[in-house]
Image: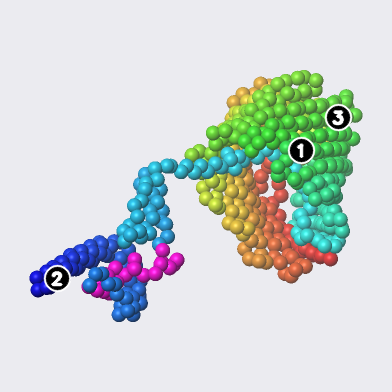
Amino acid sequence: MKPLYKYIFLLFILCYFNNEVIAKQKSTKSAQGVKQVKKTGTKKKKSKQAKKKKAKQTKKTSKSKSKKKSVTNTVGYNTIKLADLAEVVSTPVSNPVAEQVPEKTITIISAFKPQLKNVAKMNFGNASFTNDTTTLSLNYQVPSQNLTFQYKPISLVPRAIKLIKPIASTKSGQLTLGYGNFYQTEVGINYSIIDGKQHTHTITGGYEAYQGLHHLQKANKEELKYIGDFKLDSINHLQAQVFYDHHNRYRYGQVSDTSFLPINNFLQKSTTIGASVSWLNFNTNNKLVTFKPTLSFDHFIGESKETNTSFEFVNPMFFTINPSLKVNFDMAYSYSTYQSPAFSKKQNDILRFDPSIEVNLWQANFLLGVSPTISNGAYTMNPNILFKKKLKDTNYVVVAGWNTTYKINKYRDLELYNPWIDAPNDLKNTIKEAKFVELLINASKKLEYSIGVEFNDYKQLPFFNKMEMPIDKSAIGLLYETIFEQRAKTLELVAKARYQISNKLLITGKLNYTQFNSIRINSKPWGITPLNVDVNMTWEATEKLSIDANAQYWSGASFSNDFNGFHTLNNTFVLNAGLNYKLSPKWNVWVKGDNLSDKPYERWADYPSLGVQLKAGIVYSFRQ
């Protein structure tokens, strides 16, 4: 039995030592794992987000320390405490919370290829990221018609301004009274009503008169006008206008102030009545066809019972195919008849079409078309070309074009330009072929200006020269005759400027210089001023005070004299200004001054102007 006990004891000793060796090996491996965890934690502490995680680690460590005493793990016969691991790497061991998971970030690299990184932890290490080599292309396309806009004017019809949107009928009006030196008298009335259907009716009337130093240097004017805006529906309006004006003047040119002849010998009077109607459609968004027809009529009566009656129909129309393509098909027809007791009846008519295609291409605007025209039975085909482009990276817009316009000359228009003309023996249509280039500059939000050059070829351009009569001019006064130049070519320079500060100050200016390169019949462009400069200013100085001013400068025109020669008038500068002061919501006072420089001048030879003209008055406004 003793040997058996010896063998059992020896076997027990061997098992004991064998277990001790295995336990030491496992303890060594656990220590190596701890060292590996420490190295990983040390590397993580050196990351870019170490500062942000430090505060979180401190908070999580404090929570984990409270559990150190109760958290153990038994491996074999030895116990390993996890406190050391919690102190080394606390973030991975802590319970995951949604707010603690870092969000995905987008890194923009120099090649503009986005790189997506996921910094979430997996097995105590950063997840590997992949490069996104795809390129995302973002194209922003702005329609070229929104970069530059073409403005093609049409016949303008004045209408009343709606100051407020009325709920019921609204009545408002103004009464103006004024008086000044040279016995200047001014009376004006303006009355407007908006009925329950939102139709607007406006009536304006006025009377002005003056008496100069010469007993014949006097005139008076009467005018009356009605303007109606009828709202057919929310987008269609019908605008109508009826007007009447009458002028009485006396021809004092080359007439002595001591003349005792009846003043009716020198009377120069004219009367005009007219009407117009337009159909306006304000629904311009997403419309295929847009048109605005206008029909107008006027009848003029001259001094010797000459009559000039004219009709005109204008219909600008275009088809919008897409935002970059538009088809225009404008149409206009004019008819005029002139009858005089001394001359036979004259008729003029113009039928004109303007088909064209307007394209926005290459960040530019192109208009290509033709203008077939029938003028007094003669058919012509003329080009209609317009190019407009905004220069890259600048505020400059270049405009160039080539077109031909036709105009029916009316007795009324000629008399408005030169009030001292005799009844013309003929009225002809004026044709103007223009080739032009213009540069528009938008210098700032306040200032914009332009400069352009035009090469014009005129046919039947009206000139005005002194009328040669066998009768003594001192008995009837000086009259001018209308001469239609067969052909004239000109070079014109046109410059414009506009400066505006909010609604407080507005200054506009225009310069026009005309050089006649060739004239076929006449030796001089009689009555035409080569240089014209016009500057206007409106200034709202305060809430109650407003000031407006106007300055004009022109070079003298040429006229023939009694010695088969010609003379040129002096250059002229005229300064006008006025102010308006609001005393109360109903009462305003105003002052106006003309020719403030007090320099005598003559726009038309032998018709001297008045001196300084000062006029003041009041305005009474009411509203119901």
Taking the image as drawn, is residue 222 in sight? no
Residue 337: which numbered mark, if any? 3
Task: Out of 267 and 59, give the one closest to the viewer.
Answer: 59
What type is the residue that disc 2 sits on?
Ile
Taking the image as drawn, is residue 164 in sight? yes
What type is the residue that disc 3 sits on?
Thr
Give the residue at mark 1: 291
Q: Which residues are magenta?
A: 78-101
Task: Out of 136 and 462, give the one closest to the viewer.
Answer: 136
The answer to if 100 sits in the magenta stretch is yes
The residue under the point 81% across, 34% down is 313
The residue under the point 14% across, 70% down is 8
**Element type at marker 3?**
strand
The 10 Å Cα crowd at callout 3, few under 14, some 14 to 19, many 20 or more, is: some
Earlier in the chain: of badge 1 and badge 3, it is: 1
Give the residue at mark 2: 8
Q: Give the CA separation, mark 1 to mark 3.
A: 28 Å
